[in-house]
Amino acid sequence: MKTSRKRIGRTPQLPAGYQPAKEVSVSDALKLAVAMHRANGLDDAERLYGRILAALPDSADASHFMGVLQHQRGRSDEALRLIKRSIELHAGLPDWHNNLGNVLLA
Protein backbone atom coordinates (compact mmCIF):
# COMPACT_ATOMS: atom_id res chain seq x y z
CA MET A 1 0.00 0.00 0.00
CA LYS A 2 1.42 3.31 -1.08
CA THR A 3 0.94 6.37 1.10
CA SER A 4 1.64 9.94 0.24
CA ARG A 5 2.82 12.58 2.63
CA LYS A 6 1.56 16.09 2.40
CA ARG A 7 3.90 18.93 3.11
CA ILE A 8 2.36 21.60 5.24
CA GLY A 9 3.86 25.06 5.30
CA ARG A 10 7.25 25.97 4.04
CA THR A 11 10.29 23.89 4.72
CA PRO A 12 12.52 25.54 7.32
CA GLN A 13 16.06 26.27 6.26
CA LEU A 14 18.48 23.91 7.94
CA PRO A 15 21.81 25.07 9.33
CA ALA A 16 24.68 25.00 6.83
CA GLY A 17 26.35 21.61 6.77
CA TYR A 18 23.51 19.85 8.60
CA GLN A 19 23.39 16.16 7.71
CA PRO A 20 20.54 13.99 9.01
CA ALA A 21 21.67 11.14 11.21
CA LYS A 22 20.04 8.20 12.89
CA GLU A 23 21.01 9.62 16.26
CA VAL A 24 21.36 13.32 16.85
CA SER A 25 23.06 14.96 19.79
CA VAL A 26 21.01 17.24 22.00
CA SER A 27 23.21 20.13 20.90
CA ASP A 28 22.49 19.42 17.23
CA ALA A 29 18.78 18.92 17.93
CA LEU A 30 18.67 22.29 19.68
CA LYS A 31 20.45 23.99 16.77
CA LEU A 32 17.95 22.45 14.38
CA ALA A 33 14.98 23.49 16.55
CA VAL A 34 16.27 27.08 16.75
CA ALA A 35 16.79 27.15 12.97
CA MET A 36 13.23 25.91 12.42
CA HIS A 37 11.95 28.47 14.94
CA ARG A 38 13.78 31.32 13.19
CA ALA A 39 12.39 30.15 9.84
CA ASN A 40 8.87 30.37 11.32
CA GLY A 41 8.49 26.59 11.44
CA LEU A 42 6.83 26.90 14.83
CA ASP A 43 5.04 23.54 14.80
CA ASP A 44 8.23 21.63 14.01
CA ALA A 45 10.32 23.68 16.43
CA GLU A 46 7.77 23.16 19.21
CA ARG A 47 7.79 19.40 18.68
CA LEU A 48 11.59 19.28 18.74
CA TYR A 49 11.89 21.52 21.81
CA GLY A 50 9.35 19.24 23.48
CA ARG A 51 11.38 16.14 22.65
CA ILE A 52 14.54 17.77 23.99
CA LEU A 53 12.76 18.74 27.22
CA ALA A 54 11.32 15.23 27.58
CA ALA A 55 14.85 13.83 27.41
CA LEU A 56 16.51 16.64 29.40
CA PRO A 57 14.00 18.54 31.55
CA ASP A 58 16.81 20.74 32.89
CA SER A 59 17.87 22.06 29.49
CA ALA A 60 18.00 25.80 30.08
CA ASP A 61 18.28 26.56 26.36
CA ALA A 62 15.33 24.38 25.32
CA SER A 63 13.23 25.79 28.18
CA HIS A 64 14.02 29.33 27.14
CA PHE A 65 13.37 28.95 23.44
CA MET A 66 10.20 26.94 24.07
CA GLY A 67 9.08 29.80 26.32
CA VAL A 68 9.73 32.35 23.59
CA LEU A 69 7.78 30.18 21.15
CA GLN A 70 4.88 29.84 23.59
CA HIS A 71 4.76 33.62 23.94
CA GLN A 72 4.67 33.96 20.14
CA ARG A 73 1.63 31.68 20.17
CA GLY A 74 -0.14 33.78 22.79
CA ARG A 75 0.44 31.32 25.65
CA SER A 76 2.01 33.82 28.00
CA ASP A 77 1.45 31.88 31.22
CA GLU A 78 3.34 28.90 29.82
CA ALA A 79 5.97 31.26 28.38
CA LEU A 80 6.54 32.82 31.82
CA ARG A 81 6.90 29.43 33.48
CA LEU A 82 9.43 28.23 30.91
CA ILE A 83 11.49 31.42 30.71
CA LYS A 84 11.62 31.71 34.52
CA ARG A 85 12.77 28.07 34.66
CA SER A 86 15.51 28.74 32.10
CA ILE A 87 16.75 31.68 34.19
CA GLU A 88 16.74 29.50 37.34
CA LEU A 89 18.94 27.04 35.48
CA HIS A 90 21.24 29.63 33.89
CA ALA A 91 20.84 33.18 35.15
CA GLY A 92 23.83 34.77 33.44
CA LEU A 93 22.26 35.69 30.10
CA PRO A 94 20.89 39.25 29.97
CA ASP A 95 18.86 38.49 26.82
CA TRP A 96 16.86 35.92 28.76
CA HIS A 97 16.00 38.48 31.44
CA ASN A 98 15.01 40.88 28.67
CA ASN A 99 12.73 38.25 27.12
CA LEU A 100 11.15 37.67 30.53
CA GLY A 101 10.52 41.41 30.76
CA ASN A 102 8.97 41.42 27.29
CA VAL A 103 6.56 38.63 28.25
CA LEU A 104 5.66 40.39 31.50
CA LEU A 105 5.12 43.67 29.63
CA ALA A 106 2.80 42.01 27.12
Image (cartoon, rainbow, N blue to C red):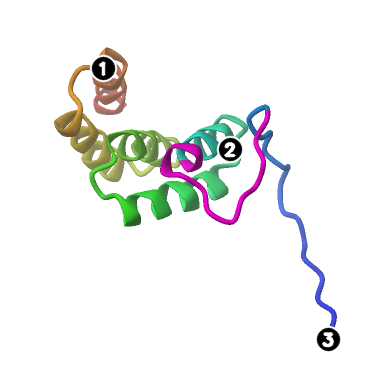
Which residue is identified by label 1?
93
Residue type marked 2: Met
Question: Is label 2 in a helix, a strand or a loop?
Answer: helix
Residue 98 appears in which quarter of the rendering? top left
Q: Which residues are magenta?
A: 17-29
CA gap between label 1 and label 2 equals: 22 Å
Check disc 2: other Cα within 10 Å, few if <14, some if 14-19, many if 20+: many
Residue type marked 3: Met
x and y percentages locating residue 78 in the rendered image: 28, 45
**Label 3 or label 2, whichever comes before in sequence order:** 3
Residue drawn 59% across the image and 56% down it: 22
x and y percentages locating residue 105 in the rendered image: 27, 22
x and y percentages locating residue 35 in the rendered image: 57, 32
Residue type marked 1: Leu
Residue drawn 56% across the image and 49% down it: 44
Question: Is label 3 in a helix, a strand or a loop?
Answer: loop
Q: Is residue 40 left or right of residue 65?
A: right
Quadrant assignment for the N terminus: bottom right
Residue drawn 53% across the image and 54% down it: 23
Which residue is identified by label 3?
1
Foreground residue, 90 or 78?
Answer: 90
- Where 41 sits versus 50, above or below? above
Predominant SS of the magenta segment: loop
Check disc 3: other Cα within 10 Å, few if <14, some if 14-19, many if 20+: few
**Label 3 or label 1, whichever comes before in sequence order:** 3
Quadrant assignment for the C terminus: top left
- Residue furthest bottom as drawn: 1
Which residue is identified by label 2?
36
Looking at the rendered structure, the number of numbered marks drawn on it comes to 3
